[in-house]
Image (tube, rainbow, N blue to C red):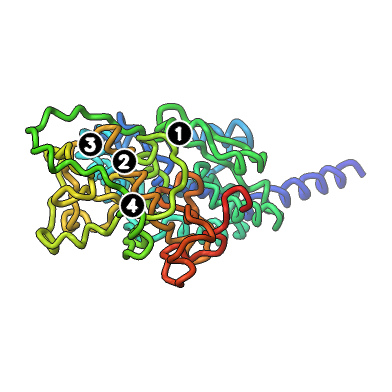
Amino acid sequence: MRPTCKVEEDMVKERGLFKDSLKGYRVITLIDGDGAIFSSDLISQGQQGGHLAASLLSDFIIQYLSSNYGARPYQLWVYLFFNKRGLTDTLGRVGLSSASKMFEDFVVGFNQATERFTMVDVGSTKEAADAKLKVHLNDDIQLPQTFKIIFGGCHDNGYVSSLRSQITAGFREKLILLRGYTQMTTTIAALDLPILDIPNLFMTQKLAPVTRWTPPTPSYPSNQIVTDTATVLDESSKVSVESDEVDPAGASYSRVLQRAVPNLRERSAREPSPSTEGSWEGSHVSASTGTRHINPNLRLSKQKPPPCTLFYLSNCKHGAKCKYGHDYLLNDEHFEEMRESSRLGPCPMINRGEPCTWGDECCYGHRCGRGGNCPFYKAGNCKFRGADMHKDPAGA
């Protein structure tokens, strides 16, 4: 009887090993590269930094899995989606010029490190990286060969619903969060999923803008000083607003430029569009590191050409072809004036009846400050067209 029992035990063990081999240990790492940004030290090393980043990522993931789930024949895939142009511009804009110059070489090095590691430039299309990550998450997590999904998008609340859906579908045990910034969003943290930390791999804080000193500029006749803002407030609700040019694809790192100044109260209207300045209409301004000085006696909107609001506060998709200025030397007061002016125009997402993904950090206005008494609203031509955009803030 005993030999028979031993044979049966061996058969059960072999059957278990066979099922275990069929299960597979495919590990998919999905990274939103617009928010989980590799450290500037690694990026500045170009291709060598890309190789090192891939090695750190691979080594720490395998070490984490082996420590928590046992030594297995793990097969690691990494998909990172990002807006290369937007991120390159932002790195330079916040003072990381070396990282900005070497970023393309870094991407090449990362992609060359191993066949299964891929950094993909998805361009500036709205939520392009988000869409691709969500599709990969949904498709890969359902495969029986997928052992774990390591998700690197902890900076963006927009992923919460997708993650929660997978948890509800019974895939909680397959999910691991990859921390980018030290402070992840509270809603993602509240999912109570395992968290993988990799020291020195990603930037731990959101990019901070650099305040550059503006040298003294020549004096201008005092009669050029503009002090009357009444005309701006009277006309702003009926001028065209170019806020639809906002590109949320770079939301994760471009929002930092909005933090150059304190949050301001929401305002009701916007200054007349700079496109009315006929003397420079149609001209193009080449972007540079910042060499143009502001005329201190004129509002920013009256500079020729005016500074590009989207370039400094968000993410201008026109680049060197933009007809507004990308090459101004701006200080904190200029950023404050620019943000205050941009709040005078309606948020395009709220205007379309959609929730604003920028929330309180949106550089555009979420309600008309004139409320229900706005004469343009009563006439049916106020640019604040979204629901509740004319309610009193106290009653909204």
Labels 4 and 3: the sequence-earlier one: 4
Residue 177 percent coordinates (x, y): 56, 41
380 left or right of 396?
A: left
Q: Are marks 2 and 3 in contact (CB under 8 Å)?
A: no
In this view, 131 is above or below 359: below
The CA distance from mark 2 to mark 1 is: 47 Å
* Label 2 environment density (alpha carbons within 10 Å; few <14, some 14–19, many ≥20): some
The CA distance from mark 4 to mark 3 is: 25 Å
Residue located beneath label 3 in the image: 330
Q: Are marks 4 and 2 in contact (CB under 8 Å)?
A: no
Q: Are marks 4 and 1 in contact (CB under 8 Å)?
A: no
* Label 3 environment density (alpha carbons within 10 Å; few <14, some 14–19, many ≥20): some
* Label 4 environment density (alpha carbons within 10 Å; few <14, some 14–19, many ≥20): many
* Residue 337: mark: 2
Image quadrant assignment for residue 88: top left
Labels 2 and 3: the sequence-earlier one: 3
Residue 163 percent coordinates (x, y): 61, 52
The mark closer to the camera, 1 or 3, is 3
The CA distance from mark 4 to mark 2 is: 28 Å
Q: Nearer the viewer, residue 259 or 387?
A: 387
* Residue 59: mark: 1
